Amino acid sequence: MEAKGEAGSDEFSGRLGLIFATIGAAIGTGNIWRFPRMVGANGGGSFLVPWLIFLFLWSVPLIIAEFALGKRSRTGTVGTFRIFAGNRFAWMGLWTAWISTAIGFYYAVVTGWCINYFQTAVRGGLGSEVDTVQVWNDFLQDPSQVIFFQTLSVLITMAAIWKGAKAIEKVNVTLMVSLFILLFAALFLSFVMDLDDGTLDGFIYMFSIQPEYLTQPETWINGLSQSAWSCSAGMGMAITYSVYMRKDEDTTLNAATMCLANNSISIIAGLTVMMAVFSVSDDPLGAVSGGSSAITFLVLPEVFAQAPGGPVVQLLMVTMFFLALSFAALTSMISTVELCVRNFVDHGIERKKAVGFTTLAIFLFGLPSAALWILVDPDTGVAFPQFLEVQDHIWGYGLMFSGLFIAYSIWKYGWNRYRVWQDENDITGFSFRDYLDNGVSSFRDDFINTGDNDWWIGKWWDYIMYLGFPIMFGVLILSYFSDLILNVNNPWDPTNADGITIILLFWGITAGLFVSMNKYILVNRVLSMNGTIWPPSWDLEPRPLYRNVPVGAEVSIDTLPGGEDPFIVEVGESLPETFVNEYGETQTHTLHQLPWSSQS
Amino acid sequence: MAGSNKETSQNFVSNPRRIPAMALLMPLMLSVLAPVSLIAPVDAQESDSGMAPEDIWSEEYSNQIFPWGGNDRLQFREYHDYFTMKDRMQQLADQNGDIMSFHEGLVGGVNARGQEMGTDDYEGWYYNHASPWIKMTGGGEELEGVSGGDCNVFVGDCGNYEELPDVMLVGNHHAREWMSYEVPMLFLETVAYYYGMAGVDNDGDGLIDEDGWDGIDNDGDCLRLNSSYQDSNGDGIPCGPGDLGVDEDFSEQFITDMVNTREIYLIPMLNVDGNRYDREEYCGESAWESCYRSGWRKNLRDNTVTGVTPLPDIDEQVDPTCDGVDLNRNYQYEWGAPLGATGPLFPGMCYAGEAGANNDVYNGPVDTVDQDEDGRLNEDHVDGKDDDADGLTDEDWLGGNSEPETKFIQDMTEMNDDNGDGSSEFKSTLTWHSYSELVLWPWGHCQDCDNPDQEFLEYHGNLMGDMTAYAPMQSSDLYPTTGDFCDWHYGVHDSYCYTMEIGIAFHEFPEDIAHTAVRNLGVPFYMIEIADDPRYRAVVGIENTTASQWLASPDLVSVPSNGEIPIDFCLDSTFPYTTNMTYTHLMWRFVEPTRQQDDFGPTEWITVPWKMSGFVDVGNSCELLDGSNGTVLQAQIPVPDSSVGKIHYKAMLGTTNGAFPFSYPTVEEGPNYYELSVPYRASFGSAVLALLMFSLIATMVWGGLGYTLKEMFNDERDVLGLPPEMRNLEEA
């Protein structure tokens, strides 16, 4: 509020703040439980090769793009797409926000699990004598407990983002630094454990290349998907946080730093898990690659309970691990909620209100994931949340399309610039050479290499965005769907929760809904002429979009589709009094007398 | 509205009512829709007594909808008639040309008795149709199919293999017994649909092959139903054969194996003439209304030789039922023996009026040919004995096999001689009749007379009785019959022959077709299974030797630290097992977690097709389950050391005479395979190379991170990667 009161805008205090916030968003449970599983299932060191390659082919370029988009648009995802892709495409921003929020619904539940495991560990409930399956089943099958910790995670998140960028930054710095320390300590203990049996086999497996795996497409696809998910590239998170960038902030080196930090943590967490499991388990790879969250909540407590150094060290280790996990989950949760909140704030809704009902919604819509359809796997007797799994199944890959939309707005910008250049130079007819020089590279020239950066981005980025990205996107989507077709019974049965039809159905309904609301809700507001919703007597007026531009960071958006829209204004600017409606008449805008300040 | 804008624009300001921006939250509702739009999956924990079929099974299975789709007739809600049945047989044979061929009657030639037979000799007297039939085989080990192997010119089929046992399945001897061709049709549909499949979840409950044909609800799913659903066929037996949830998830692999290792001769409607007459003239299309427990039984022989009117001549002065022959009294074994109640007083005689009460079982004319041309007529009747002590047996018979239909069975039996030894290939034969819910075996011609295989015939008969909840008994215990199909096959050709008396009426109501047919579906498969050596299987089954033998369960398997995994099989050394891999082998498949797991659900597995490994006698001994000593056979499962996952395995045990297969683990032991976890056994890699790789990764990731951080806070910095020409530009 303080920052807003003065300048009407909100920003991070500095570069470190931004870095920590984005790292916090990127690092999540995926680094800690998905990464070790991927390493285990894809041939150890063989997996690290594609994983690292795709870090530079997928994650870094996409994050750079997101930073560039957000820093220029200075709005959340909906506004960014409205400005960059034009009014007709604002729904793409809503899709991006929705996917993140939909994931947030159940992610809050998962965060609650982590917090619960932390407190159970503290209270000594994960000692060597307990049956971890029992602990897990007792917890998961008791809705009141699950919901309690889900509530807790939502409340913590709400508190963290209540006050905006500066608070987010503080929380993230604290949590991330603690996470590093905790993970390093756990890594050290793991190392001792693995060394204890004299082999260090967990370490060796994780860094041994098994050549046959490198020739299998699955290894590469999994490397790509891990890279894509783990850094949250394409999720819109970087767009959101770059809204709070200061005026001359770097966007490229930051992206690289963030992704590298994410992967650094993956390696540390991966090593911790692998070494611990290998030192204790008879069938370590079976345990690691056995799927699902089981490794975290079933295997690891068992493993840590056998750490050398007696009960105190064991308690310390399991506590540290689950605290680190909770922190990782919380910081991701924060970015998820902030992403949603930012979109509301952009449209003139007071931050506190937005935070309030976003967290309430995340809590309410997370309830089914917390308590519905808690089944028991007949093979293993382990409980699992079927509803939550279905949600993950449906929305997890929706992330891919958020990335595609980002790429689309870049392609579109390039093409528009080329047409403008043609007009300026009176050239007709398409020339590939000219398109490369004046279209393809224009996004990079105009928005990335702006002079603020510590790292100048070369043509390679264009190649990745124009060629590499569509190929990688296609491979990922195709492999995902063919995997479903081949390995799932009745994939086309719409009632099959693991099938394809259910995904396509939900995507289709969501996208259809978003596209159809684009005009009436995202870009325009519906006014009721007679004061009631029914009988309908409706009219449209442009929906104002308020950009969060810090002092001195004003940059022109004139070359962008959104630059021509008079109702896209900076926070603190007043709106035009009138607008021309779709019948060509001039009409008074209802909000012109209500400037931003009096609203908030 | 547009025109009024200017006037009302002031009102806009004073009275704007916004549609709340909360509308933005609309999509959130989607998440709430999710539980509604999904059908709740079966809760693995719930097993209360009040479930409805849809709670347990797929909607299709719950409504007994067969997976091959099609109209009511194909779904067994309506009877086939001769024409639609024949069309469907042809269609299925066309679609499954590798394992099925369609035929009508026989081609003919000189038969085993030296008679010149033409194609039309097998056509019905009146409508002139030959019985349609299907030959079915996968062609054994090489899977050469129904068009491979030897071709038989007389019979007209190919796909004859000396090593494959043959089995004959015959329906509708008696025209009015409509279920007796519907059951074979369901059998045919089942084979056509499931052949080549494996691991199908037939009932949609998430389990595979958990309830095979034995008349028992092995997986207990029927018992989980609310009691009002437990007797879906309404026969008064809850969760009995024919009820939903009983024997519903059979093994498709078994069907495939059976078709591949047998030659199956399926003749759904032997008595086409009679059946058409019953449907078209005697009872009509809706015979269940007009003739529920009556109808036309015989074929259409013109006994009164009027030869003018449709047969039987309804307007004849003599008893019209005097026309036609009861085909199941017309076979030659002990033909025409006077048995009172169910046979005419004198063989070959048809009486009009009151005296002709038994004309329904008229067994055909007395023979007038001196077959052995010794000048004496009918002096050595077919009964397995040399009645005239001339050194020849049964060479000059009294009568029987006089009809086109019975001649067809006779010549198919006698001319289908794959190994050329002159005896029948059909070790097991089955014929369907209705009604009475019975399983019958020879003899029929004598009462209180045991036959040499009494105990063994009883053994199989009782099993099939269990399978259907039909009463098993020797045929003559019901009532004596002479010249029936089974007496002839057993008496003359030493074939284990069974008669199924299906259902509770000749013309069942259409809504009873499906469940009645399902109830009888296991029987033909059982007859096919035992066709390799029914006598031997009965001996083994009775003595239960196979039950004391065991296949090593997972806790007895020690996975070596590298290489193939040995699986022991402990066998009774007196048991005539063979190590021929075709008959005896270990079947296994490797199941590993998918590489793309869901993050929150249970582990997902990739399943692969079954593979085979042969067994070798390794010369060790082991203890059988009954405590005696056994011999160890061992098979090796080749699994790469680097694989992690589970192995499913089971053993197929064949015997020296080709009986195939006894499978282990046995049905009593639960699921039909064992599951063994296999850990990663390969080396984890070299420490040196791992260190190198670690340094490389650490340099790139951690070093990279350090480098970018350093660059970030280096105020004297140069822009990384700036091309020289850009730098000049900047400086300028």
Image (tube, coloured by chain):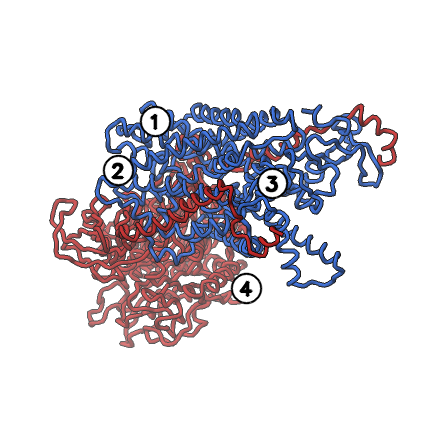
The secondary element bearing badge 3 is classed as helix
Q: Nearer the viewer, residue B65 or A562?
A: A562
Q: CB atoms at circles 2 and 4 under 8 Å apart?
A: no
Please report, as a chain letter, where disc 3 is located: A
The secondary element bearing badge 1 is classed as helix
The image quadrant that residue A271 belongs to is top left
Q: Residue at label 1?
A: A121
Q: Nearer the viewer, residue B421 or A52?
A: A52
Q: How far apart, in angstroms, are the residues tagged by discs 2 and 4?
A: 99 Å
Disc number for residue A70 = 3
Mark 1 or 3: the one toward you: 3
Please report, as a chain letter, where disc 1 is located: A
Q: Amino acid at mark 3?
A: Gly
Q: How far apart, in angstroms, are the residues tagged by discs 4 and 3?
A: 96 Å
Picture residue at 22% right of the left edge, 66% below the top: B387
Q: Nearer the viewer, residue A549 or A191?
A: A549
The secondary element bearing badge 2 is classed as helix
Query: Which chain is red in the picture?
Result: B
Disc number for residue A193 = 2
